Image (tube, rainbow, N blue to C red):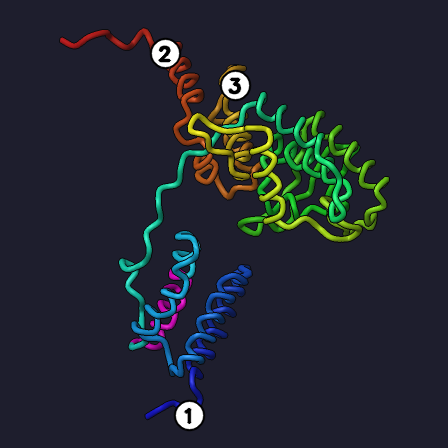
């Protein structure tokens, strides 16, 4: 018999699921968007509930999206259906073995100081536009903070004037990934760049209220993550900043470069790397050094330093040849 209220069980389950997740302090905003969009699809298809056929039809509609996005959406539905199974043993549960497979990510491009110098020179030559009167200053500051503070793209575009203390050289990163907030001290050169930018921002007549976005396009309009991404890509192309195979760095590669540079400094100065890793994790806003280790995968320069340190300490214990 057809349900007199189509998708009534689905709606009730979504409400209970989201409430249970948010009771744990999680936002679940992207997950809610995925489940609501699936709900719209089911309603338009005249379905009473989700089954294997409708699930396959729904995910085929997302074939144009990136593999990572598709997998995230499929996993979101899977976790929701798994939750429903606790009280509805016969509800549909997608087969996780049928989900799309991620392609291996290319190793990050480690941006060198000489390349940063070229990027800053290219940013200085940018002309103001009608939508971005201080475009040059914005891009210079963006490159400096991405490279010297290891900020995530979203963290950078969400900064407000109230989040920066230019005299002390400190940034406040609020409610970032993992719902963590932190204070980020910046280098002396980055502090000088920030102060120069704020003066240019004031001269341009942009919004000076404490809640105004730090990276401003027009009077009160903030840079979005996508616009910042496109500007960084264009700047890298203009400055001819590429790796050995001609690939320009991604915005995330600046964060990788920051982490690797910190590791190299410790090796070069003889610091205790293991003791300092938790400090790096804290600075970058990670839950633990396990997350930080993702940024420190096989890098030839780091491996060379690590090998040299190992040889200095244990070289006399290694016997050449085999018996």
Q: Quadrant of residue 62?
A: bottom left
Location of the N terminus by quadrant is: bottom left
Residue 112 is inside the magenta segment: no
Q: Nearer the viewer, residue 244 or 266?
A: 244
Q: Nearer the viewer, mark 3 or mark 1?
A: 1
Q: Give percent across and percent down for residue 279.
A: 55, 32
Say left or right for 1 vs 10: left
- Report the residue at 42% width, 58% height from top: 64
Residues packed near mark 2 inside 10 Å, few (<14), some (14 to 19) or many (20 plus) = few
Q: Give percent across and percent down for residue 129.
A: 74, 44
Question: Which residue is disc 2 drawn over?
Answer: 311
Label 3 vs 1, first from the N-terminus: 1
Q: CA distance from mark 1 to mark 2?
A: 75 Å
Q: Give percent across and percent down for residue 26.
A: 53, 59
Location of the C terminus by quadrant is: top left
Q: Nearer the viewer, mark 1 or mark 2?
A: 1
- Report the residue at 31% width, 66% height from top: 94
Under circle 1, the secondary element is loop
Question: Which residue is disc 3 drawn over?
Answer: 271
Magenta segment boundaries in residue numbering:
74-89
Under circle 2, the secondary element is helix
Label 1 vs 2, first from the N-terminus: 1
Magenta stretch, overall SS: helix
Numbered circle sitting on residue 4: 1
Under circle 3, the secondary element is loop
Say left or right for 201 vs 307: right
Residue 86 is inside the magenta segment: yes
Q: CA distance from mark 3 to mark 1?
A: 69 Å
């Amino acid at each position: 018999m057809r349900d007199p209220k189509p998708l009534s069980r689905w709606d009730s389950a979504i409400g209970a699921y989201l409430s249970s997740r948010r009771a744990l302090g999680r936002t679940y905003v992207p997950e809610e968007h995925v489940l609501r969009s699936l709900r719209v699809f089911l309603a338009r298809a005249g379905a009473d509930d989700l089954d294997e056929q409708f699930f396959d039809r729904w995910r085929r509609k997302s074939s144009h999206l990136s593999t990572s996005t598709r997998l995230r959406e499929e996993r979101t539905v899977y976790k929701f259906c798994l939750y429903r199974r606790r009280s509805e043993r016969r509800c549909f549960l997608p087969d996780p073995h049928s989900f799309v497979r991620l392609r291996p990510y290319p190793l990050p491009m480690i941006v060198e100081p000489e390349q940063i110098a070229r990027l800053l020179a290219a940013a200085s030559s940018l002309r103001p536009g009608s939508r971005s009167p201080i475009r040059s200053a914005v891009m210079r500051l963006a490159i400096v903070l991405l490279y010297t503070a290891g900020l995530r793209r979203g963290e950078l575009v969400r900064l407000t004037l109230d989040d920066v203390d230019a005299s002390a050289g400190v940034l406040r990163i609020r409610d970032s990934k993992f719902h963590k907030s932190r204070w980020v001290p910046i280098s002396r050169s980055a502090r000088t760049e920030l102060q120069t930018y704020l003066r240019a921002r004031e001269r341009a007549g942009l919004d000076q209220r404490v809640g105004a976005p730090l990276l401003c396009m027009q009077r009160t309009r903030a840079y979005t993550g996508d616009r910042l991404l496109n500007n960084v890509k264009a700047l890298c192309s203009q400055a001819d900043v590429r790796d050995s195979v001609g690939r320009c760095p991604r915005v995330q590669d600046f964060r990788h470069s920051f982490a690797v540079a910190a590791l190299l400094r410790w090796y070069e100065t003889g610091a205790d790397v293991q003791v300092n890793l938790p400090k790096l994790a804290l600075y970058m806003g990670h839950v633990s050094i396990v997350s930080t280790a993702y940024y420190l995968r096989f890098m030839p320069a780091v491996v060379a330093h690590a090998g040299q340190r190992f040889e200095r300490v244990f070289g006399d214990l290694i016997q050449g040849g085999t018996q």
